[in-house]
Amino acid sequence: MMPLSILLVLLLLCLLTSIPPSFPDAISPPRGYFINCGASKEETLSGIRWTSDGEFISVGNVSEIKVTEGKYLVRTTYYYGGFDGGSEPPVFDQIIGGMRWSTVNTSANYANGLTSYYEIIVYALSTIARHCFGSSDQIMSYPDDPFNRYWEPFKDENPVDNRSPSPFSWRMFDVSVNGKAFYKGLNVSTAGVMVFGTQWPLSGQTQITLTPPGNSPVGPVINAGEILQAVPLGGRTLPRDVIAMEELARRFDNPPPDWRGDPCLPSSYLWTGVYCMGSDIVRVVKLDLTDHGISGTLPDIIANLTALTHIWLGGNKLSGSIPDMTNLNNLVSLLLQENKLTGKAPESLRGRSGLDLQLSPVFNF
Ligand SMILES: *[C@@H]1O[C@H](CO)[C@@H](O)[C@H](O)[C@H]1NC(C)=O
Ligand SMILES: *[C@@H]1O[C@H](CO)[C@@H](O)[C@H](O)[C@H]1NC(C)=O
Ligand SMILES: *[C@@H]1O[C@H](CO)[C@@H](O)[C@H](O)[C@H]1NC(C)=O
Ligand SMILES: *[C@@H]1O[C@H](CO)[C@@H](O)[C@H](O)[C@H]1NC(C)=O
């Protein structure tokens, strides 16, 4: 998926060279989950506690973390050391909930012996670059950045005299982007300042020019820059369907291993046996787990999947009774034969015209 628009955020923190950046004496570690995949025990590195992924993963490649509502940042870091000969560095998709976030391609970084990392503010902004200029050292992060953002060094070609100490505690300049005035007379003090435009879609080479007034003894200095990309959001699965499918997954003793996350999205990653339709609002329309050896029970909440047209669960080991499915007005086919379901089929299902109903012989109608 190509970037639709690039949102550029420039951090202009013109710290005067004579005043060192100051941070509170004790910085509390950034909040969040720091998960070290494959680690067997907890470890503290540079003040951050990394836990093992044991309790977060299933089938080795799906992690589940409960987050509260609101924005959150997800960063994934991959290092491929070429353990299998290095001829095919891993390439795979990253998905958060129902959103296909990005493709991870470790090839280029593997060739340079580097890690690959990806960052997104869920839902919407993916980090393209975050650099601190004029530094040639290592990536800056916690505790220099209390939020543990990663600032990659970027050697710039600013004239050195730009960095001479200012006689003032501020620097003034105009900002233009690709030759268009963006901000006139910005006065940046040591407290920092933020300016942003809500409608400046950018792509390709972008030139940002900072022009000091003619009488200014010093020019502006860009200390750091961040580029974020707006991630196009696809449709979404009706939450009511998601909740019902999650309950179904819980009630099965052995659901297919990919019954995690969003059942319908991204559309190329549907749950096994689940079929969906819709664009803005996506619904579950068909369930086909015929002969999958599934045991467990059918929850009443299946009746909330009101877009279902086909339920094909024949040839499994399902037990318990058949829930009331009166609500499922679109149902044309309900195949539950060859299971261990007991009791009577619900009244409402019998003789519904146009419904192909197949149940085990133990049912008496
Ligand atoms: C991964 O990136 C390399 C270049 O860095 C490229 O040659 C290769 O085609 C990419 N692989 C896939 C599957 O996109
Ligand atoms: C810039 O702002 C500071 C206060 O932060 C003020 O003292 C100073 O006069 C301003 N400079 C100009 C040129 O307006
Ligand atoms: C399921 O449907 C019932 C009845 O329409 C409704 O009260 C309930 O909130 C639904 N459950 C969910 C999780 O949406
Ligand atoms: C990774 O996940 C996919 C789909 O969830 C599954 O089919 C596959 O077996 C998993 N691979 C491993 C190594 O667990």
Image: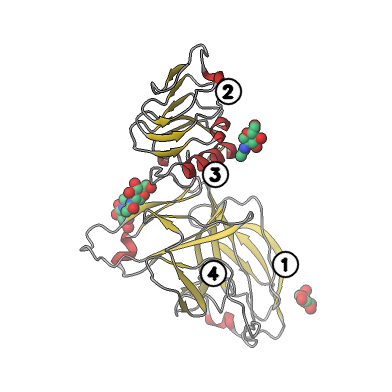
Give the quarter the ligand 2 occupies: bottom right
- Cα gap from disc 4 to disc 3, whole angstroms: 24 Å
What is the distance, in whole Å, between disc 4 and disc 1 at their CAs?
A: 29 Å
Residue with the mark numbered 1:
185
Dot 1 lies on which element? Answer: strand
Res. 79 image quadrant: bottom left
What mark, if any, has residue 233 been given in the picture? 3
* Left-right relation of 37 to 90: right
Is residue 100 found left or right of 190 in the rendered image? left
- Is residue 280 in sight in this rendering? no
Return the residue at label 4: 149
Query: Residue 18, position in %: x, y?
Result: 64, 88
Q: Residue 326, labelled with which disc?
A: 2
- Its colouring scheme is secondary structure
12 vs 290, left or right, is: right
| Label 4 or label 1, whichever comes before in sequence order | 4
Q: Is residue 272 above or below residue 112?
A: above
**How many residues crowd around disc 3 within 10 Å: few (fewer than 14), some, or many (20 or more)?**
few
The mark nearer the N terminus, 4 or 2, is 4
What residue appears at the point 28 percent right and 59 percent down from the top-left corner?
A: 89
Residue mark closest to the camera, 4 vs 2: 2
Label 4: state its secondary structure. loop
